[in-house]
């Protein structure tokens, strides 16, 4: 074999070997967790917020007056139209699972709960709610007002 041919073969083998080694040493991407693995196969999607119009939401709230009972007077602080049943994280966003009227619904920060309370923050095991200009905390495992 000619030296030039031998050099080209060695160079080709070196390149193939280098590619093989670099592919073997490259870290693999992390395994993506499938949400069905964690929630028992129940299919659901996080709620989609269609309109983040704050002024429109304030106008709607002021027209519906969720802070008042049927007689128009402010509702009692002891009235609770919902119950915190869970908190999940989907794609990095925390979602509060709230039971009201026998149904469990998903709520995000800023959403209005049944009865007019507004979710201020959602944490790992509690939420903070704005109720009649007062901030209240509701723990996932104990529901005391």
Image (cartoon, helix red, strand yellow):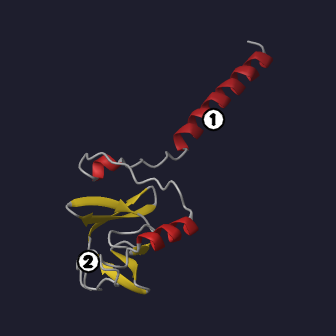
From this viewpoint, which residue is outermost toward the front? 71
Residue 101, image quadrant: bottom left
Q: Quadrant of the C terminus?
A: bottom left
Mark 1 or mark 2: which comes first in sequence? 1
In the rendered view, tell whether residue 71 sits above or below residue 4: below
Residue 16, image quadrant: top right
* Number of the front mark, 1 or 2: 2
Residue at 49% across, 46% down: 29
Q: Nearer the viewer, residue 28 or 79?
A: 79
Q: Nearer the viewer, residue 44 or 101?
A: 101
In the rendered view, tell whether residue 61 sits above or below residue 71: above
In the rendered view, tell whether residue 133 sits above or below residue 70: below
Residue 22, image quadrant: top right
- Measured in 3D between alpha carbons, the distance from the residue under mark 1 to the one under mark 2, in whole angstroms, is 67 Å
What mark, if any, has residue 119 been given in the picture? none
Q: Position of residue 124 (x, y in %)?
A: 37, 71
In the rendered image, which residue does mark 2 sit on?
80
Q: Position of residue 3 (x, y in %)?
A: 78, 18
From this viewpoint, which residue is outermost toward the right? 4
Question: In the image, is 135 to the left or to the right of 115?
Answer: right
Question: In the image, is 87 to the left or to the right of 62?
Answer: left
Give the mark count. Answer: 2
Residue at 42% across, 47% down: 31
Residue at 40% across, 53% down: 46
Q: Position of residue 27 (x, y in %)?
A: 52, 47
In the rendered image, which residue does mark 1 sit on?
18
**Local crowd at mark 2 within 10 Å, few (<14), some, or many (≥20)?**
few
Q: Position of residue 102 (x, y in %)?
A: 19, 61
State yes or no: discs 1 and 2 in contact (Cβ < 8 Å): no
């Amino acid at each position: 074999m000619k030296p030039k041919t031998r050099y080209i073969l060695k160079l080709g083998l070196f390149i193939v070997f280098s590619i093989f080694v670099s592919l073997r040493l490259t870290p693999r991407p992390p395994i993506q967790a499938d949400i069905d693995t964690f929630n028992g196969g129940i299919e659901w999607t996080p709620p989609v917020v269609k309109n983040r119009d704050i002024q429109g939401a304030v106008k709607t709230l002021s027209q519906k007056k969720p802070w008042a009972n049927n007689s128009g007077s402010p509702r009692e602080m002891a009235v609770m139209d919902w119950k915190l049943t869970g908190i999940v994280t989907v794609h990095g966003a925390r979602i509060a699972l709230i039971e009201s009227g026998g149904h469990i619904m998903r709520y995000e920060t800023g959403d209005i709960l049944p009865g007019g309370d507004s979710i201020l923050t959602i944490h790992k095991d509690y939420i903070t709610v704005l109720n009649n200009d007062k901030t209240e905390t509701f723990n996932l495992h104990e529901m005391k007002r």
